[in-house]
Image (spheres, rainbow, N blue to C red):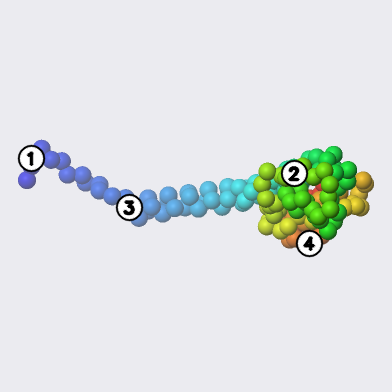
Amino acid sequence: MNPNHKTNSRAGVTLIEMLVVVTIIALFAAIVGPRLLHRGDQARVVAAKEQISAFQLALGQYKLDTGTFPTTEQGLAALRQQPQGTEQWHGPYLTKDLASDPWSHPYVYKFPGEHGDEPDVISYGADGQPGGTDLNADVVSWK
């Protein structure tokens, strides 16, 4: 035995200390967790609005080149691939492939739109169904 070696009378962590730490972590998760989840949901709504804005900008460029917006049948795909019979198409008008909305549902495109001279671009929200409130509310191009 080494006489200069001190023995640590308290080696390790007690069960009570571990329970206190686990309780603090659980309380923190219970208080902060729902707030973080709500922020994630808000981020999805913001992302859908930004994607719709990008579609609107690309649709404006498409119209400048071709003289009209893509038909409902052609859809947003006309921004990436030239539709048959479309003259003066100088695309692609989107740098990336068409993305689904943040809830993994396809965007709905209608032209002529029901809300003015511009096309309607819609994300049906978390439930993927028309209408709804809160996270299930539609994110639309005309608002």
**Mark toward the viewer: 4 or 1:** 4
**Mark toward the viewer: 3 or 4:** 4
Which residue is drawn at the image coordinates 21% and 46% (left, top)? 9
**Mark toward the viewer: 2 or 4:** 2
Q: Nearer the viewer, residue 113 or 27?
A: 113
Using residue 63 as the reference point, say whether residue 82 is left or right of it.
left
Q: Position of residue 41 (x, y in %)?
A: 67, 50
Which type of secondary structure does the marked residue at label 1 adopt?
loop
Which quarter of the picture shows residue 92? top right
Q: Position of residue 127 (x, y in %)?
A: 73, 61
Q: Which mark is residue 129?
A: 4
Which residue is drawn at the image coordinates 42% and 49% (left, top)? 21
**Residue that badge 2 annotates:** 91
**Which numbered disc, 4 or 1, marks the residue that appears first in the sequence?**
1
Q: Which mark is residue 14?
A: 3
- Disc 3 from disc 4: Cα separation: 53 Å
**Which numbered disc, 2 or 1, marks the residue that appears first in the sequence?**
1
**Mark toward the viewer: 2 or 1:** 2
Amino acid carrying label 4: it is Gln
**Residue that badge 1 annotates:** 3
Is residue 33 in view from this perspective? yes
Which residue is drawn at the image coordinates 50% and 53% (left, top)? 26
Is residue 122 in view from this perspective? no
**Which numbered disc, 3 or 2, marks the residue that appears first in the sequence?**
3
Which quarter of the picture shows residue 132? bottom right
Amino acid carrying label 2: it is Gly
